[in-house]
Amino acid sequence: MKLYYNTIIIGLLLISCGQEKQSELPEFPVDINQNISLSLSEIAEEITSVELELTDESMINSDNFMRVIITENNIILAEIGGLFTTRPVLVFNRDGKFVRSVGSNGQGPGEYSNILNVAFDEKNSRLFILSNNPDRIICYQSDGTFLKEARLNLNSFDYDILYNNNELFFVCMGIIDRHNTKKSVYRMNENLQVKDSIICFESYFEDSANEGPFASDYIIKNQTSIYIYSKEVYSKWDPPTVKVSRDTLYRLEENKLIPELKLKFANNGFDRYGDKIIDLFNFYRSSRYIFANYKYNPNNRERNTEFPKMSYFCYDTKTGKGYNMLEGYTDDINRIEERVIIHPLTTNSEYFYYWHTNMHPNDLQEPNPTLYIGKLKK
């Protein structure tokens, strides 16, 4: 009988340990002291290039952050993130020929004075533009026809939108008061009205907060799931009370955010004084790879170097290798000399893009930068 009970107890302990291990969140270490050159041939299955036609209407400055959407027939480009962006959304075909611009500068119906982000409904060929001054979402047919718009009464910043399965998702960081901020994911109906929301980040500050980049990729989907990264906003000298796991990527399932994985920085990204010194700007995944962009930002008591630069991280879940880069990736496929910075296609993170300007001997003026589109290995 004693042996029988001992067997049961051991069995329950094994089950308990197995459940505890299964519930642990996978962590992927980031070595901020590492600086290597990861070649794109190691992660990319293929890379195609598209030379975009240069006209008076279609000039592109790739120094501005560009949202790139690849549809079945077209390439849609938008300059986002600037305070005074007045350039319209540009549409090229898949061969790079300029097709049209969408919308125009202004504050009237169907006009915008600044683009915060864009999204595309492939099924119904509709383009959504998130603009401010005032805050609103504007919907166009892909041929440029204005359809509708809706005002957004949100005191917020850090915007992103994504269209998926007949729903428009809107992510923003709302300012509740000078001490409290909250990031939420909103689901919009066909009339561009909020039908429900999920709080994905909330923090309290003893003092005013520092904010990150004005625009980023907070909501990205791959072939199976939608992922949310909730960037922290924090006070340098008074770390906030944070109601979310730090440096964690979440998977959106119905009305729940499920923790998917976590980046592991030394001492969780804090220095010996208790200040957070890792500023994570972007965090997403494909079926095989995990990507992040961050800045190592020590405080004035320890910083004796120049203003912090962006670092780039890639982790290969198949090989178990992590790569940390201070200047970007090496394009050994197209033999581009300088490092390149890759960005995910937010509609499918199995693909990425980057820019490079190729000058030809017969060019009388600098051409548009070439768009490179890469497909990741699986």
Image: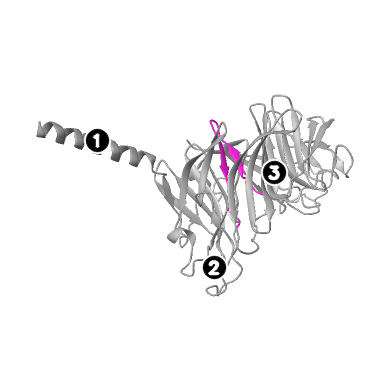
> Which one is earlier in the sequence, the residue at label 2 or at label 1?
1
* Circle 1: residue type: Leu
Q: Which residue is mark 3?
A: 67
**Is residue 24 or residue 98 the one in the foreground?**
24
Q: Is residue 33 something one can see in this rendering? A: yes
> For residue 74: magenta?
no
The dominant secondary structure in magenta is loop
Alpha-carbon span between mark 2 and mark 1: 47 Å
Alpha-carbon span between mark 2 and mark 3: 30 Å
What color scheme is it?
Answer: one colour
Give the structural element (helix, strand or loop) at label 1: helix
* Circle 2: residue type: Pro
Q: Which residue is mark 1?
A: 12
Say which quadrant the N terminus sits in. top left
* Circle 3: residue type: Arg
- The quadrant holding residue 317 is top left
Give the structural element (helix, strand or loop) at label 3: strand
Residue visible at 53% across and 62% down in the picture: 276
Q: Which residue is mark 2?
A: 298
Residue with the most extreme front position: 1
Rendering coords of residue 226 (x, y %): 57, 35
**Is residue 173 or residue 328 the one in the foreground?**
173
Q: Which residues are magenta?
A: 216-233
> For residue 219: magenta?
yes
Give the structural element (helix, strand or loop) at label 2: loop
CA neighbours of label 3 inside 10 A, class few (<14), some (14 to 19), many (20+) = many
Q: Nearer the viewer, mark 1 or mark 3?
A: 1
> Which one is earlier in the sequence, the residue at label 1 or at label 3?
1
